[in-house]
Image (cartoon, rainbow, N blue to C red):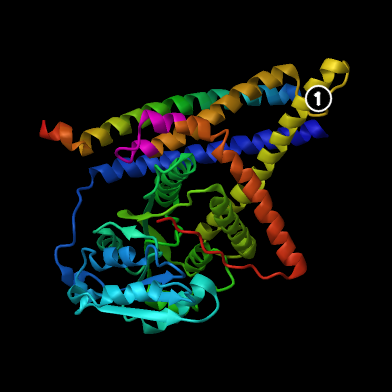
């Protein structure tokens, strides 16, 4: 049973891991961009300066 | 057999994480579009609909006057607002505080009615009794602890005007006003921000699906009357009415700028009671609406039922089984120190385990990321303290959901088996 499932589960696990890694990297970058934009838009202190 | 069970659970968690990622992408698109829109009010007040604001209040003397004052000072034409406050089965001075407020000369010209009610049905019953006196085209509901921002009602009404034929209800955002009180309230704030700014937003952007949050929303008077009012048997009347609205082919639209502050529980006992009630109520609503998956209902209601059913049953069960396997494996590890050769039944092959640990780590990161994406979109909330809290909350606050869900499920089963009637529990207020 152990051998049966590893033959297909390992490649799927690798694929899922790669997809999640790419998604989390991309979403992290987008989160930082949104944070910067929101802070710039609503920070009255910086606008007044 | 057990390894097959573990694999199914792992795949389920992958699907749950993928769902979270898709919803996050919807939320990002919404945030991006929303940031481009200028903040604008309607050109003239003529187009604004008349609104009956209803506030159900059971023993709310601590907060009711402040709430109603906020409502009376909303930026909305006063001649278009009728306010009905229902002092529902109150044993305290809720009605007295309201009478004091009403006696204030500045409110003499306002359509402000105090309804002292003795009846059953909890919040739903109170709203159903009040609706008989409602004259507005739309009904607006605020809970007794709500503090709507000045333009909240204006934004709700403005949204309704975008598609008056299709929008049966419009809901806004709710924020925790006591969010910095303690660790629990800070975690509740994170949850609230994430659900409002990621889940509600993502579901609306991707599928035009919305759900009523119980407070800070408007609903067409005609529609709620057609539905027969709010369900007095439902513990979570907001979720129940959301399904009914969608079953009628109407949409529940999101007005993100319509914000109201509400008080969240400040101690664990109050919190657990509230959340167990919500959990039980939502479980019941999901089961009552499960048939929509298989009948000729609109695809939106199928998506909503599938989303709730997956969250409350499928994904939750997978997490519980994996957590149990983890705990049992720790136990076996300790036993192995004394009795070598004892093997845990919950095992993966070593090369599979490595990738599972990596994807487990990534899923944790997705959990933290969705909270921080929500915080990033709410000015002033994306702080280092909140980031640390989001990392810690996975191992602390988030684990409460497992306990609450099991308790809610058990309570619902007992109700069904014994025929016990659920009591509507009022959340304790803090001054």
Name the residue rendered at 41%, 48% in the picture: B196
Question: Which quadrant of the figure has residue A40?
Answer: top left
Name the residue rendered at 39%, 63% in the picture: B62
Q: Residues within 10 Å of mark 1 (few under 14, many from 20)?
A: some
User: What residue span does the magenta drawing correspond to?
Assistant: B375-388
Question: In which quadrant of the rendered image does the N terminus of chain B lie?
Answer: top right
Q: Position of residue B145 (x, y in %)?
A: 39, 61
Q: Position of residue B142 (x, y in %)?
A: 38, 65
| Mark 1, residue position | B332
Q: Is residue B382 magenta?
A: yes
Q: Is residue A48 magenta?
A: no
Chain identifier of the residue bearing label 1 in the image: B
Residue B427 shows in the view: yes
Name the residue rendered at 69%, 40% in the picture: B320
Query: In the image, B134: left or right of B417?
Result: left
Secondary structure beneath disc 1? helix
A23 or B298, nearer to the observer? A23
Query: In the image, B294: left or right of B162?
Result: right
Query: In the image, B403: left or right of A38?
Result: right
Residue B83 shows in the view: no
Q: Position of residue B123 (x, y in %)?
A: 49, 71
B216 or B420, nearer to the observer? B420
């Amino acid at each position: 049973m152990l051998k049966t499932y590893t033959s297909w589960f390992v490649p799927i696990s690798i694929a899922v891991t790669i997809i999640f890694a790419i998604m989390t990297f991309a979403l992290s970058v987008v989160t930082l961009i949104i944070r910067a934009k929101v802070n710039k838009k609503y920070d009255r202190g910086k606008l007044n300066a | 057999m057990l390894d097959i069970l573990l694999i199914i659970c792992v795949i389920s968690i992958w699907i749950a994480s993928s769902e979270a990622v898709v919803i996050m992408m919807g939320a990002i698109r919404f945030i991006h579009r929303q940031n481009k829109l200028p903040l604008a009010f309607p050109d003239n007040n003529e187009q604004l609909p008349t609104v009956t604001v209803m506030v159900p209040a059971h023993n709310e003397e601590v907060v009711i006057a402040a709430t109603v004052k906020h409502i009376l000072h909303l930026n909305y034409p006063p001649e278009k607002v009728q306010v009905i406050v229902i002092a529902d089965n109150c044993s305290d001075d809720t009605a007295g505080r309201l009478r004091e407020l009403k006696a204030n000369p500045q409110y003499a010209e306002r359509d402000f009615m105090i309804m002292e009610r003795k009846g059953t049905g909890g919040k739903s019953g109170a709203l159903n009794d009040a609706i008989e006196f409602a004259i507005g085209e739309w009904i607006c509901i605020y809970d007794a602890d709500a503090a709507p921002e000045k333009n909240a009602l204006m934004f709700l009404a403005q949204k309704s005007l975008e598609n008056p034929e299709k929008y049966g209800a419009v809901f806004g955002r709710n924020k925790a006003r006591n969010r910095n009180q303690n660790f629990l309230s800070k975690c509740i704030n994170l949850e609230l921000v994430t659900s409002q700014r990621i889940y509600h937003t993502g579901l609306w952007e991707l599928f035009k699906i919305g759900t009523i949050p119980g407070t800070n929303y408007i609903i067409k008077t005609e529609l709620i009357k057609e539905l027969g009012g709010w369900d007095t048997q439902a513990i979570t009347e907001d979720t129940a009415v959301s399904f009914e609205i969608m079953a009628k082919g109407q949409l529940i639209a999101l007005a993100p700028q319509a914000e109201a502050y509400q008080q969240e529980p400040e101690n664990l006992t109050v919190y657990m009671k509230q959340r167990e009630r919500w959990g039980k109520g939502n479980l019941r609503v999901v089961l009552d609406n499960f048939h929509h998956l298989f009948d000729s209902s609109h695809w939106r209601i199928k998506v909503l039922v599938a989303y709730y059913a997956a969250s409350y049953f499928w994904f939750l069960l997978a997490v519980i089984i994996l957590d149990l396997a983890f705990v049992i494996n720790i136990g076996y590890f300790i036993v192995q120190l004394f009795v070598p050769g004892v093997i845990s039944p919950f095992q993966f092959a070593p090369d599979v385990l490595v990738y599972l640990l990596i994807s487990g780590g990534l899923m944790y990161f997705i959990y933290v990321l969705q909270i921080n994406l929500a915080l990033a979109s709410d000015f002033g909330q994306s702080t280092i303290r909140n980031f640390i809290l989001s990392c810690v909350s996975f191992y602390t606050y988030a684990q409460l959901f497992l306990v609450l869900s099991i308790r809610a499920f058990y309570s619902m089963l007992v109700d069904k088996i014994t025929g016990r009637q659920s009591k509507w529990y009022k959340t304790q207020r803090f001054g």
